[in-house]
Structure formats: structure tokens, C-alpha cells
Image: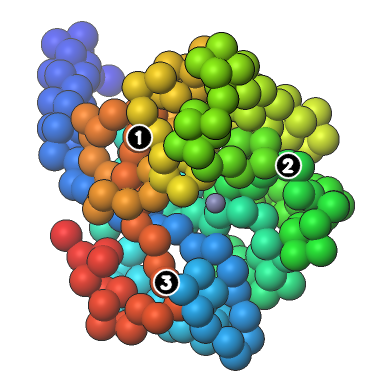
Amino acid sequence: MPSIFGLRAVAAGLFCLLAGAAIAAPPVPILVYHRFDPSQSGLTTVTTASFTQQLDWLAAHHYQIIPLAQLAQWRDIPSPAVAITVDDGHESVFTQLYPILRQRHIHVTLFVYPSAISRASYALTWPQLAEMVNSGLVDVQAHTYWHPDFRKEKAARSPADYRAFVDMQLVKSKTVLEQRLGISVTMLAWPYGIHDPMLEDAARRAGYTAAFAFAGGQAQPGDDPLAIPRIPVSGWVTLAQFTRLVSP
Ligand SMILES: [Zn+2]
């Protein structure tokens, strides 16, 4: 059995290793997708073939796909790592993406605006969301209540009305998702990537601990936790361009 001094030395060594890992944590790309289609591609629609090609490339280059919540805490981050997010709750998340997630056992975070769920013809339904959450492969987080353009709303409303509107968008999206799915919602994706200090303040008050922008390169420790950058992946991105997006 090692002496108490031996144990202390081991503990000190571990501490140095952990501290070193935290300091040296390399940037991590957080990818944003929207829609998936078997054959059509577009600005926000990626074909399932392109997506699986990107996953194959990541696997061949030893990337680990980590849950976004793990990344937001910068704890035990492998290298290289990548996180996958999907905005807006389009029905193709269930019909096209979910089978791929199950097949490859990949974790993604969906940012959805609950006003559309089970209402809009293009959107996911509550039972589909519940099934994906139950699989353990899909985390559902907030994208405000109805995906407003906060710049337009600010211009069109009085200051007091705008503040109330912002609070409603941030609080209602969180409470509705939590109640309908029995989950905890602490992360938010800003619609259109629009955020400012007032919005970040409102997000903090609403109980969000991490919020994500829509551009800005790879995420790293020390980022503003309420404006963490993400990298949109368009359906027009070639595999060569994709590899540049995720490379250090
Ligand atoms: Zn969106």
C-alpha cells in the first residue's frame, strides 16, 4: 500500500495533469445543420450522403463526437473532438437524421422553437421529439419560442414591450420544452445568431447557462458562455471545405 506521501504525490501529479489539460484544451468545432434530404441539397439542406461522408471523414481522422453539454462545461474534452447541433426542428431530423444517429450511435443537440412543434407542417412532432430524447442520442434545447428576429422586434416595439417580449420568448421556450419532454433546458441557440448584452442578460435571468451564436469559428475555453460560436454547414459545402472547417 503506498504511503500517505506517495498518495499525495499521485494526487499532485493528477492535479497538474488535469490543470494542464484544461489550459491546453484545443478549440472544438460546433457544427450547425438544419435540414436533411435523401437527394436535394441547398443552403440549409444537406444530403444524407454528404452528411454520412462527413461523419466517415471525422471517424477516419479519430474525431470524437461529444455531447454539447459536455463541451459547454469544458470537462474531459478529448482531442480531436466535434459537437453536432441541429437548429429549427425540421421533420427531416426524425425521418433522415435520426436513423443515422441510431446506426452510428452519435449524439446531437437539437435547438427547437416549441411554437412550431406538432403544428407547422414542416416541423417535428412532440411524440417524435420524445422518442429521440428517450433514445439517449438526442438532447433537446431551446431556440426561443417562435424564432423571432430580435432586431426587427426591437425596432417595432416600445422598450418595455420589447423587454417583455424577449422574456416571454426565452422563458416560454424553456418551460414548454421542460414540461412536454420532462427534460432540463439550460442551453439556447440565438435565432439568426442575433444577440447583444441585453439579450444575454435576459437569457441569464431566464436560467440559461450557455447560449450559442451562428458563426465565429471554433469554440474554445474563455468564450463568452452566452455567445459561444458555431459553424454552419451548408448543403453546398464540399468535403474538402468541410475538412477545413473542422481542422485546427
Ligand atoms: Zn433557427
Q: Is residue 233 visible?
A: yes
Number of numbered discs visible in the structure rendering: 3
> Taking 39 as reference, is 84 left or right?
left
The residue closer to the viewer here, 180 or 1, is 180
**Residue extending furthest top?**
4
Q: In this view, does 151 lie above or below 229?
A: above
> Taking 40 as reference, is 220 left or right?
left
The three-letter amino acid code for the residue at tag 1 is: Ala
Q: Residue at x 56, y 12 (%)?
A: 160
Q: Position of residue 65 (x, y in %)?
A: 43, 58
The three-letter amino acid code for the residue at tag 2 is: Pro
Q: Mark 1 points at which residue?
A: 227
The three-letter amino acid code for the residue at tag 3 is: Ser
| SS at badge 3 | loop
Q: Mark 2 points at which residue?
A: 114
Q: Is the residue under label 2 in contact with that under label 1 (CB below 8 Å)?
A: no
